[in-house]
Amino acid sequence: MDLLEHTGKSLFASAGLPVLPSRVARSPAEAQVAAAELRLPVVVKAQVKTGGRGKAGGVRVCATDGEAAAAAADILGMTIRGHAVSCVLVEQAVEIARELYLAISSARTHRVPMLIFSAEGGVDVEEVARRNPGALVRTPVDPLLGLCDYQVRDVVAAAGLGPELAGPDGTPAKQALAGAVRALWRLYRDSDATLCEVNPLVVTATGELVCLDSKVTIDDNALFRHADLKAEAHAAKEDREARAHEAGLSFVALDGDIGVLGNGAGLVMSTIDQIAAAGGAAADFCDIGGGARAEVVAAALDVILSMEAVSVLLVSIFGGITRCDEVARGLVQVLGHAGVDVPVVVRLDGNAAAEGRALLADAGIPGLTVAPSAGEAVRLAVAGAAAPAGPDARREG
């Protein structure tokens, strides 16, 4: 379960990680009050569980409380990569001297936590690994031994911080970084996280180390051990994610315009890859799992179609435990009784596929096309997304 930045930073502060004074605001008036309480200038940041906020205009530096109110008014009306902005974080601004990257993540290939550090922050770690491999430290952490002192020393050495860098209180930046690495490990371990990431972790012009962002993902299966954290995590959930979770669906919002519904993570991921190869982009990842009944399919459609970015819906089902006729009943239940403004492409194969196709044919749902194969379904969906909007573009083939 992903947490919003402000929730993650509350955990950071509790763990002893350095964060800046900030306030959460849900209206321009609250943002103005928050900016007046903090030391100007401030940064107003959209609170959404996705990257690319800065490029989308969701991060603004404001010199006055009036500017903060205006920025909040603009940002609170945004949708960034399919995520509606319901609140902003108003935070003191700092002058940045260095940007670093620090994270601890569950590494499935190694089956241990992985400590990751880069002397270059603010960019994708994958890009740094390709361009400057020497700037990246990746070291597995033994879950029984925990974080070792030599691993902390490796991070500090890779950072290349000079002895002249020290905070206002005289704490050397090297010492502060070592403390941040240890604090991040404690947070990861004690909160049953699968990811604790700081990007960027900055050294300010005054030599102070500060976490400018936070990304924290909590293992859902461990929330029973964290009553307060469970409440925080549920509060951070977006409406459609909460609906998907309640229906037992695996749902992840992406930044494309083709809604994808399938059964099985492997099928859904391969469908998303095929869409990308055909020149399209998926708007979400929605897996209804095995043996899904019509009501689960209906719940999945409700979640997907609530995304404004979706211009085409692609349903790809390979029936095994899941019966294709049950999927068809769910489609008819939603699409047959409510007007849907986007084309729908359906591929049904496997268990009860013929029965499912017959149900869809009998329903005669406008804008719905049954594709003969997975490849043809992807082609039709990508073509539908690329077609101009309007009644003539609702159906192809």
Image: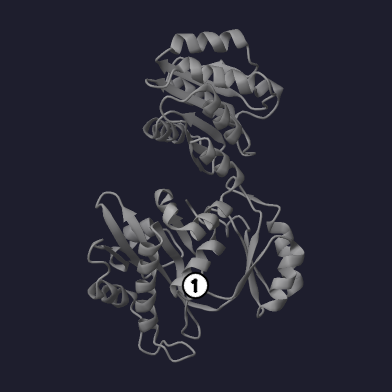
Q: Which residue is mark 1?
A: 13
Number of numbered callouts drawn: 1
Q: Quadrant of the C terminus?
A: top right
x and y percent of residue 373 in the render?
43, 18
x and y percent of residue 225 in the render?
42, 56
Give me the residue at 47% from left, 60% from top. 215
x and y percent of residue 345 in the render?
54, 22
x and y percent of residue 269 in the render?
40, 35
Give me the residue at 71% from left, 22% from top. 391
Give me the residue at 69% from left, 74% from top. 35
Using a 10 Å C-alpha cutoff, classify the residue at mark 1 as few (fewer than 14 neighbours), some (14 to 19) or many (20 or more). some
Q: Secondary structure at mark 1?
A: helix
Considering depth in this image, is 86 or 226 the residue closer to the camera?
226
Give me the residue at 54% from left, 53% from top. 49
Residue 371 is at least partly visible in this image? no
Considering depth in this image, is 108 or 291 the residue closer to the camera?
291
Q: Is residue 161 above or below residue 151?
A: below
Considering depth in this image, is 186 or 162 the residue closer to the camera?
186
Mark 1: which amino acid? Ala
Residue 197 is at least partly visible in this image? yes
